[in-house]
Image (tube, rainbow, N blue to C red):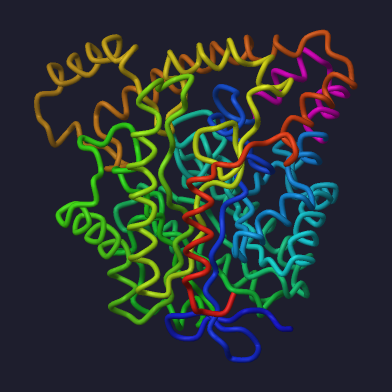
Amino acid sequence: MASLRVKGTQLFNCNNAQVVLRGAGLGGWMCMENFISGYPGCEFQIRDALNDVLGESKANFFFDKFLEHFFTDADTTFFRSLGLNCIRIAVNYRHFEDDLNPRVLKREGFQHLDRVISLCASHSIYTIIDMHTAPGAQSGGWHADGGTHIANFWKHRDFQDRFVWLWTEIASHYKDNEWIAGYNLMNEPADPHPTIAPLVEVYDRLCSAIQSVDPNHIIFLDGNTFASDFTKFPENVKQRWGENVAYAIHDYSLYGFPKSKEVYLGSDDQKAKLQAVYKRKRHWMDERGLCVWNGEWGPVYARREYDGDATDEINKARYMVLRDQLELYNKDMLSWSIWLYKDIGFQGMVYVSPDTSYMERLRPFLLKKHRLAADAWGTEDSEVKHFYDPIVNLIVDAVPDETRRKLYPPLWTLEDRVTRIARTMLVAEFLIGEWAEIFRGLDEEDLDRLARSFRFENCLKREGLNDVLRENAKASKAVI
């Protein structure tokens, strides 16, 4: 077997047979996220807080056990049983480098990544390494692990130099691994420069550095502004970055989220809107005959403890969104990675059972965090919206020129910006200590029991979602 390659607009294996990658994102594992595992704020903040409460040794023990139990051979067996063939592994740069000890590789960072890549290979599952965070944060999202809405990666050359160095080390480590489909260099960049010159320069440097040590693996490049905008990419991308490159869109549909203004019924008009958004995102690549990969997509789901009797009807509509998006992708033979494989119950294909020690211990805190809408992702904020609306109104009154209220990124409305900064950063900071206190006094046996809650055998399956994915795999004819 040889590494996959991009040829024109599609992927092919060593036998020159077309391959369509159909898979999921392994998020919340080597790059933890608040809505996935239940903490507030950013990963670096809760790691620091747990160090304060437990001490460094026991905190490290818990996080290592979490990595060990979160993904095992049972997960790969189940994943492959659905007919899926690729896992996009989200990684935090902090596993490989400390900010206070830059450019010194932490080789222990490869321990669990090597293990999971090998497990996937043993089940004929490709992997894509997704650098979900960059030093200084490549966006103002919680998932960039920066703790602020300012993407400082674009403001400091040294952050960029370190990122190029790190990717060179990772590519050197994996250059001969043929079950790695490729490298997703930067998740959802948000370069605010009007010409995106910094992003283009970083991609120039990354492609050159990686291809100098590893010319075989596919490079996956996200569009700017959270993988949505390619319009300012240079025209000579094939000459500049090479032929073995796929361009990554993220195709979340508002119909799959609580803030949708209408219930998705699968009407012709709604399907047309789904298609229009999807086609707009890939339009730049289609005009130039480039390969497109959908690195993230998928609805979130209602939960009975929060949504009550409406849960089943909400999720019925969400599964309809899922099917109709897949229909669009199949027509284009599009490779994709749905978000998300595993979590505590909001979006994952499998999720931690409510009767595990982790969920029982965190339940009161999770209910509080949900009521306060302390996470940004897919939040229903009706219980706290009235606290933030006056801030929005204050800004509107103080800045009557609407054009001056349009700040980067344009995907964040004024309301989004206020609630992101005031709610999901400020309020979340005050909840971090409370989350860490839940672990106080626990010994290693207790901590291991909590981490074991994330093992596959302690998870439930989201059957509606998995049935759709299984049916889609059976109906698909491309090589997997």
Q: Quadrant of the C terminus?
A: bottom right
Residue drawn at (47%, 27%) of the image: 303
Q: Is residue 386 magenta?
A: no
Taking depth in this image into account, of 91 and 397 the one nearest to the observer is 91
Q: Is residue 131 above or below residue 34?
A: below
Q: Main secondary structure of the magenta part?
A: helix
Across and down, in percent, residue 318 comes to 36, 43
Q: Quadrant of residue 292?
A: bottom left
Taking depth in this image into account, of 104 and 368 the one nearest to the observer is 368
Taking depth in this image into account, of 328 and 393 the one nearest to the observer is 328
Q: Is residue 58 magenta?
A: yes
Q: Quadrant of residue 244?
A: bottom right
Across and down, in percent, residue 465 comes to 49, 48
Q: Give left or right: position of 405 versus 252.
A: left
Question: What stretch of residues is rendered in magenta?
Answer: 44-64
Taking depth in this image into account, of 376 and 332 the one nearest to the observer is 332
Q: Give left or right: position of 225 versus 473.
A: left
Residue drawn at (75%, 72%) of the image: 175
